[in-house]
Amino acid sequence: MEEYILVEKGHPLAGEVQIEGAKNAVLPIMAASLLAKNNTIHLQRVPQLSDVETMAAVLSNLGAKVVRNGQHMHVEVPSILQTQTPEHLVSKMRASVLVMGALLALEGKVSVVLPGGCAIGSRPLDIHLRGFEALGATVQLSHGIIEASVDGRLQGAEFDLAFPSVGATENLMIAASRAEGKTILRGVAKEPEIIDLANFLNAMGAQIHGAGTDTIEIMGVETLTACEYEILPDRIEAGTFMIAAAITQGDVIIKNIIPDHLQPITAKLQQLGAKITIGDDWIGVQGNKDYQAIDIKTGPHPNFPTDMQSPMLAILLCADGVSTLTETIFENRFMHVEELNRMGAQIIVDGRTCIVTKQSLHGVRVKATDLRSAAGLVLAGLLADGETRIEKLYHLDRGYVDFVEKLQKLGAKISRHSS
């Protein structure tokens, strides 16, 4: 059954919206839960997303028992885990590769097919695998299957990441938590989700220092135990609603957030001309009818997040002058530009840079190409005259909880249908 969204240009959004737990934090934390052998991990503020269900299925196939009750999740870890990840699940979602570090540390071996997920670039696993080798593992890649093993425990080591890869930083943190001796990781990712994973591992008894800086030091421990942990708020969902408020010239308060995590998005919306008010755990966004062109370049945290460039591209179509948006992380994340141009945009792609001028949009039938482009197309639909139909919603469901319902409560003319 094919589902689709119908959205019309309507009134400015107004009201309050509550933000869920972060998808990009909960997935590595679920993978790291495997380190608690013979224990149960209790997670709170777990978002109800299809990616979370996929990771839960991965853990279940490895032998863990995952119980979900609303936003609460219990992960019961047995004494022995399976070491071969299920291909049909790994092919759905790239984050499933994060179980490699835990299985290698616990069972001394792991076999995993190359992962799937959004088609936004090659995202090679080279850094993950070289890091595992630095920790003493033997790694082989053949016919799309990665096999890694270690004789005894992983050994602490010093390793410099060639690029601040979020996934590699997470995988190596998880693996090194139970390695013998001290591990020093340099050139690591500094995203808030990295800090959240370190805090979770430390709550289990790990000894990790430096998360959020360029260098993370990990003193390996023999065992990790049960804990309760609350997932941090989703800064990407929050940023999407900030743009939705601005793009409709609305007045919305985004609640249950950590405002510091949204600083790169806040700065660009202010530069455009939106009015931003910041509280302890909320941000208010008031839109403007006179936006001015800006230049944006994505990059590793604390730069503008790559996950926000698709939604941000929609609001640049409202700005007077010529805006540029340069993507430095993924080489293939402009597939949605063709869909926006079908709506009347005249975006020019020059290498990794989009050149954007103010255009009037009209509603047409479009297809999401990845998770964040789905949200970007919905936001563009809020701008377009007539009715916009967005298809391929399974992308949207990977990262947004009740997206349509939340927009409806803010006053958007939007609905979800099946055909």
Image: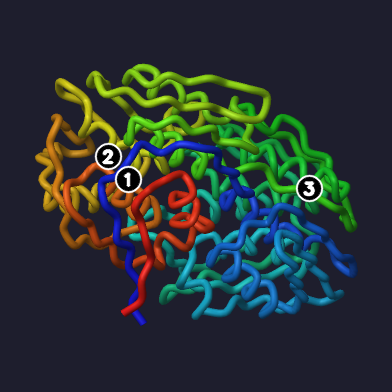
Image location (x, y in percent) of residue 282: 61, 30
Residue bearing mark 2: 314
Is mark 1 in CB contact (under 8 Å) with mark 3?
no
Identify the residue under disc 1.
Answer: 379
Q: Looking at the image, is mark 1 or mark 3 nearer the viewer? A: 1
Give the amino acid at mark 3: Leu
Q: With 138 as the anchor, is 339 left or right in this view?
A: left
* Secondary structure category for the residue under label 2: helix
Q: Residues within 10 Å of mark 3 (few under 14, many from 20)?
A: many
As measured in the structure, the alpha-carbon distance from the residue carrying label 1 to the one carrying label 2 is 6 Å
Image quadrant occupied by the C terminus: bottom left
Residue type (three-letter) at the residue carrying disc 2: Ala
The reply to whether the C-beta atoms of the residues labelled 1 and 2 are less than 8 Å apart is yes
Secondary structure, mark 1, is helix
Alpha carbons under labels 1 and 3: distance apart: 37 Å
Query: Which quadrant of the structure image shows residue 370?
Result: bottom left
Q: Quadrant of residue 217?
A: top right
Q: Secondary structure at mark 3?
A: helix
Vertical order, 286 against 202 (above or below): above
- Image location of residue 399, percent across then percent down: 49, 56
The label on residue 201 is 3
User: Which residue is more in the foreground, 411 or 218?
Assistant: 411
- In the image, 329 versus 397, the foreground residue is 397
Q: How is the image coloured?
A: rainbow
Q: Is residue 121 visible?
A: no
**Badge 3 vs badge 2, beta-carbon distance below 8 Å:** no
